[in-house]
Image (cartoon, coloured by chain):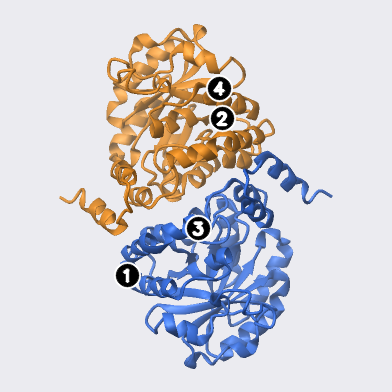
Chain colours: A orange, B blue
Amino acid sequence: MYRPEIKLLDCTIRDGGLMNNWDFDKALVKDVFEALAEAGVDYVELGYRADKRIFPPDQSGPWRYCDEDLLRSVAHECSTKVSVMCDVGRTNYNDFLPASESIVKMVRVASYVKEIDKAVHLGDYLKDLGYETTVNLMAVSHVLEMDLDEALAQLAGTRFDAVYLVDSFGYLYSQHIHYLAEKYLKALPGKQVGIHCHNNQQLAFANSIDAVVRGINYVDATVYGIGRAAGNCPLELIIEFLRNPKLNVRPVLDLIGKHFIRLQQELQWGYQIPYALAGCHNKHPRSAMAAMKGDGAIDFRRFYDDLLNEDMV
Amino acid sequence: MYRPEIKLLDCTIRDGGLMNNWDFDKALVKDVFEALAEAGVDYVELGYRADKRIFPPDQSGPWRYCDEDLLRSVAHECSTKVSVMCDVGRTNYNDFLPASESIVKMVRVASYVKEIDKAVHLGDYLKDLGYETTVNLMAVSHVLEMDLDEALAQLAGTRFDAVYLVDSFGYLYSQHIHYLAEKYLKALPGKQVGIHCHNNQQLAFANSIDAVVRGINYVDATVYGIGRAAGNCPLELIIEFLRNPKLNVRPVLDLIGKHFIRLQQELQWGYQIPYALAGCHNKHPRSAMAAMKGDGAIDFRRFYDDLLNEDMV
């Protein structure tokens, strides 16, 4: 499935940081950037740029803030560009240098559909500073289609370079992906569309390649599938799928052997029954993550019934 | 995705047995049968019926042979039917009672495309004894399309109740599944078509549901995805996908809590880089399983290069 327009974005540190409060060793992040640059990945997202007035910096690791100096200590300018993510309403506009003075080349704005006006405002500000920008519409499986359509129509007239379809809860089946990919592509002529999947139902890779086959050109993945709860689309699988001559999986394999086998044992992302059930039923993984943090064995039947009862009216 | 014609077949013990030489405790297998009967699964495959002249019974566990008495000690006749599998060329015809005297209701014939005439001979013999029969065409990703087409044309005129599309190496992407599902359905009018997937690339569940969406009605799955190497399509996920009112995931969740979390730690099926790479490159998992059996850390880059070099001409 080679299409030169396809851009691969690794968000290992950003999404993986949700599992360790962004507290990665600097040496590990440097290894990640260097390996992914060697692998030919287009963008490497090294964390959030979160507002320190809202998230005090003594309470999270440094990759939640991605200070310019920190980024420069692990990355360098090359054909693999550095990206950071920021949340609508939890971003300090003053934290961004002009792009020409920053090592960051892309800023991705994470937004709920209801915050779209604020996302556009932030996106315009970042575009004026010279960044590539995307907007990542989170939790679309909890949104009325009418509201989604309105948001997409509005985004069509903005300067975002790409709009992401995000399966925040790992709920979407391939039919949903086909339907939504077509909707996004049709509503956003001339813009790129991206895909970001979660692996609760072991569908992150499958849905990502289905999206690519349907015409989506920006694909998110992470090394060894690291990410919140069940994790994300594994970078090593998508590299082998894409068959792009410029991509090379070997440095990613080295990275997995050097760091990510150990990290997985420590942070335990991946397929787990509570995450799977949350995904099947279109739920935030919150209660599943809480269940997984306990010491004892989980009563899966009880967990399932509690999950189904959560929203009883 | 509810369609009353869809039949769910659990092959936990049969495919899982590839990971422990079919050496499951009888009490565990009894728990499996009872839970899956309560869950509403249509068929439970309790093992192979292998030829003892070829596989001496002192060298494998009892579920490789599935003697009638053994099966009766763990299962009973009910709406959930017992199935066994047999391999073409490694089956003793005399091991089968008439179906009316056996607890087994379905026999599945595993066959390579090149053995199809022998498979038809065995299938006819079993059909004459009164069994439901399927033929499971293994390793289709290693077969010339011309040979596959010939085999399907031949099978159209046989008495097999179903013909299975089997992704033995976990290689097939959704496009392949769409293409092959359509081919099988078109070539086999009036017959059921089944799907059996392996999870090397985390695609077993995705490909199974894609096959169902395309019209395939027999679906294989296993509890917690147990199976050779990366395992199979997880039963718990497909039950929630199918939305069939007669299915209930709760007994499966109990089973996972009681036995399969522990079993997974012991047998280690699931996503592993060597299995993934073997899947990506359409290889038998043999060398990956050998690599996983070693004590030390695996050099994934070396494994990858060796894998690609295996078939160099």
Q: Residue furthest left?
A: A313
Q: CA distance from mark 1 to mark 2?
A: 44 Å
Image quadrant in which the N terminus of chain B is located: bottom left
Left/right placement of residue B32 relative to residue A35 reads: left
- Whether residue B190 is visible here, answered yes or no, is no
Q: Which residue in the protein does label 3 denote?
A: B266
Question: What is the three-letter code of the residue carrying label 4?
Answer: Lys
- Whether residue A213 is visible here, answered yes or no, is yes
Viewer-side label of 3, 2: 3
- Give the camera-side residue of B229 and B261: B261
Q: Which mark is residue B246?
A: 1
Q: Using the image, determine if residue B69 lies above or below residue A91.
A: below
Q: Are marks 4 and 3 on the same chain?
A: no
Mark 4 residue element: helix
Q: CA distance from mark 1 to mark 4?
A: 53 Å
Mark 3 residue element: helix
Check whether the beta carbons of the residues at disc 3 and disc 1 lie within 8 A of each other.
no
Check whether the beta carbons of the residues at disc 3 and disc 2 lie within 8 A of each other.
no
Question: What is the three-letter code of the residue carrying label 3?
Answer: Glu
Q: Which mark is residue A7?
A: 2
Number of other residues with Cα within 10 Å of mark 3, as a class: few under 14, some 14 to 19, many 20 or more: few
Left/right placement of residue B6 relative to residue B50 reads: left
Q: Position of residue B8 (x, y in %)?
A: 44, 69
Number of other residues with Cα within 10 Å of mark 2, as a class: few under 14, some 14 to 19, many 20 or more: some
